[in-house]
Amino acid sequence: MESPKLQVKLNENERFRKLKERFVEKFGEPPLFYACAPGRVNLIGEHIDYCGYAVLPMAIEQSILAAVSVNDTQSIQLANVNPQYKDFAVSSEELQIDRTNPQWYYYYLCGVRGVKEHLGLAPLAGMKCVVDGTVPPSSGLSSSSALVCCAGLVTLEANNKMLSKVELAEICARCERYIGTEGGGMDQSISFLAEEGTAKLIEFNPLRAVDVKLPDGAVFVIANCCVEMNKAATSHFNIRVVECRLAAKLLAKRRGLDWSCVQRLSEVQAALGASLEEMLTMVQEVLHPEPYSREEVCQTLGVSLEQLRDGVLSANTQHVTHFKLHQRAQHVYSEAARVLRFREVCEAAPDDSIRQLGLLMQQSHTSCRDLYECSCPELDQLVRTCLKAGAVGSRLTGAGWGGCTVSMVPVDKLEAFLQEVRKSYYTSDPRRAALEKHSLFVTKPGGGAALFLEA
């Protein structure tokens, strides 16, 4: 990576010190270096990166930290500080990833394999690695992508190679698909491109990041609804990807475009030179609100069921018989417009910017809940609780179907807000109460992935 390695004094950093102790205990030698990749919270712009649209996340302080040593055995030995994640060892020549069994170490292997294949590394350096994660798993804060990014960075350093942050982000976005999730690249991009003190507008094709200064006078609070959803272990996520792909193809065909090569809703807008508002009108005119059957999709596109299965559906969406194309496209185009408006408000900084941003967040959650159907009863309850407790805006963040909300809270209401959410959502439920310590926290924009050496 472009940036120099940072120095860390282990006697002043308890997390690094404990990780080194665990590494020595496990492997009988000290680590050579450390790598860190942050989780992220997406402030607005949900489920639109894989449709080609800009998103607005920031990195958080919670991260994946790895201690690493390098050898010439051509084997990779992985261990995790958390005892619920078992050890794993594999030859660096046999980096097989089991999509049907999304274990933690397969995410790590995604990062290794992505860098190996991109650079044509053979043989690959052997590695011993102990991982410590503080990003809550299956919470919508991108713990899995942070692990992929950390592994990609480790592999680069262990093999004495260099790539730019943008290149590494693009590699990690592609290679996470080895485990079956057809994401769009937001998580990996912010993990590498984040800078302390600023959120980022992340744009794609080509990948670029622009600073977005968040307003003074408000903070962002993350709250976990305590429902876990591993997006690689279900088909919810990939079904939405397929529905957006089909919506793009049907819109393209109705407007006389070569629909066969269209993959994203943004491509239709670009080809037509239309505004997002015009695309929303087109959705109303072209796509009916009733679900489309496979047969209707095939008939409209003039393809066989076999061609649909082979050319459009992913491995874990072959069973789907009906698709909600109108609703998914309506969400994507309206959410893309909200992202741009959010950035405009941050740049213009009007007196009521906090109120305006809060309203955009609430509209986003409503769209995720009603049009994209990626919320769940607990997330909806938590959003209502946060708004009632004093948040000016609150919404699900991440893939959804569980995980976290992000709320914008005026600074002067923060303590009362935290107290009310604890009381109303967590302490009233014994299971949630046990998880509350790691489920409700204030966050601020953190820095991106980095390499560390012991000072």
Image (cartoon, helix red, strand yellow):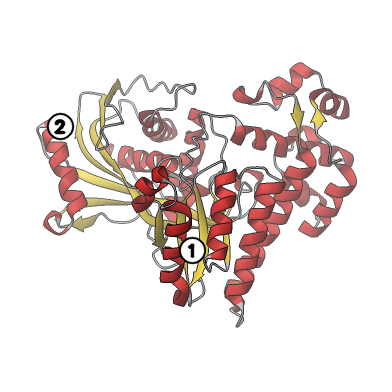
Dot label at residue 340: none
Q: SS class of the residue under badge 2?
A: helix
Between 246 and 355, the residue placed more toward the observer is: 355
The percent position of residue 292, horizontal first and vertical second, equals: 81, 31
Residue 199, disc: 1
- Counting from the top left corner in percent of width and height, residue 246 is at 75, 35
Picture disc at residue 26:
2
| Vertical placement of residue 422 versus 145, above or below | below
**For residue 10, which quarter of the picture?**
bottom left
Label 1, label 2: how many angstroms apart (C-alpha)?
38 Å
The residue positioned 60% from the left and 83% from the top of the image is 351
Viewer-nearest residue: 342 or 451: 342
Whether residue 275 is visible here, answered yes or no, is no
**Residue type, mark 2 in image:** Lys
Task: Find numbered disc 1 in the image and state the secondary structure of the residue it sits on.
Answer: strand
Query: Residue at point 53% right, 47% down?
Result: 398
Residues marked 1 and 2 touching at CB (< 8 Å):
no
- Is 60 above or below relative to 19? below
- Which is more N-terminal, label 2 or label 1? 2
How many residues crowd around disc 2 within 10 Å: few (fewer than 14), some, or many (20 or more)?
some
Seen in the picture, residue 198 relative to 290 is either above or below; the reply is below
Q: Which residue is farthest bottom?
A: 351
Q: The C terminus appears in which quarter of the rendering? A: bottom left
Query: Position of 255 compared to 200: left or right?
Result: right
Q: Is residue 244 left or right of residue 151?
A: right
Question: Depth check: 257 or 389 in front?
Answer: 389
Residue 329 placement: quadrant: top right
Give the number of marks: 2
Q: Residue furthest top?
A: 306
Type of amino acid at the residue the image marks with label 1? Ala
Residue 119: give x, y in percent of width and height.
Answer: 40, 35
In the depicted view, which residue is nearer to us: 34 or 22? Answer: 22
